[in-house]
Image: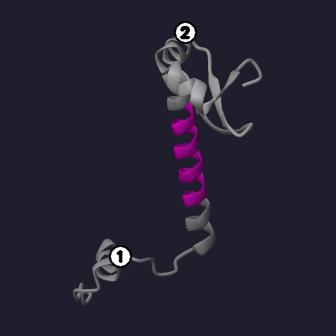
Amino acid sequence: MDDSTSVSVRDARANLARLLDHAAEGEPTVITRGGTPVAAIVPIEEYNALEAAADELLARKALQTLAEEGEERRATLADVLADVFGTPRPDVA
């Protein structure tokens, strides 16, 4: 994002429509608070690519964890729901 524009929160509020137009044209904008970057308005394609990359990374980490654990017992959905809702675990044969 070296090409990105940087604006303050105040300027972003005052010019949101223009910043959205810039994003639609492929130009990201970094929003700062007190001079520190806190957020960005990016083209939706960049956001979607970032989300896809994050999903892929999580999937790879999950596969690696499963491979490292081997055949150890894993929690079932029933186990997780019982923990979340504080209910007894059903007996599953």
Label 2 is placed on what type of residue?
Glu
Asked if residue 50 lies in the magenta stretch, the reply is: yes
Picture coordinates of residue 55, whole percent (x, y)? 52, 45
Seen at 56% across and 58% down, the residue is 63
The residue most toward the top is: 25
Q: Which is nearer the eye, 24 or 7?
A: 7
Q: Is residue 76 above or below residue 26?
A: below
**Whole-Å distance between the Cαs marked 1 and 2?**
44 Å
Seen at 62% across and 15% down, the residue is 27
Q: Which is nearer the eye, 90 or 69?
A: 90
Mark 1: secondary structure = helix
Q: Which residues are magenta?
A: 49-63
Asked if residue 70 lies in the magenta stretch, the reply is: no
Mark 2: secondary structure = loop
Q: Is residue 3 left or right of residue 93?
A: right
Q: Which is nearer the eye, 45 or 62?
A: 45
Q: In which image quadrant can residue 11 be found?
A: top right
Picture coordinates of residue 20, whole percent (x, y)? 49, 18
Which of the two discs, 1 and 2, labels the residue nearer the N terminus? 2
Q: Which is nearer the eye, 48 or 17?
A: 17
Q: Is residue 5 above or below residue 66?
A: above
Q: Is residue 57 left or right of residue 4?
A: left
Q: Which residue is mark 2?
A: 25
Label 1 is placed on what type of residue?
Val
Q: In which image quadrant can residue 40 be found?
A: top right
Picture coordinates of residue 83, whole percent (x, y)? 35, 82
Q: Which residue is mark 1?
A: 80
Callout 1 crowding tier (Cα within 10 Å): few <14, some 14–19, many ≥20 = few
Picture coordinates of residue 91, whole percent (x, y)? 23, 89
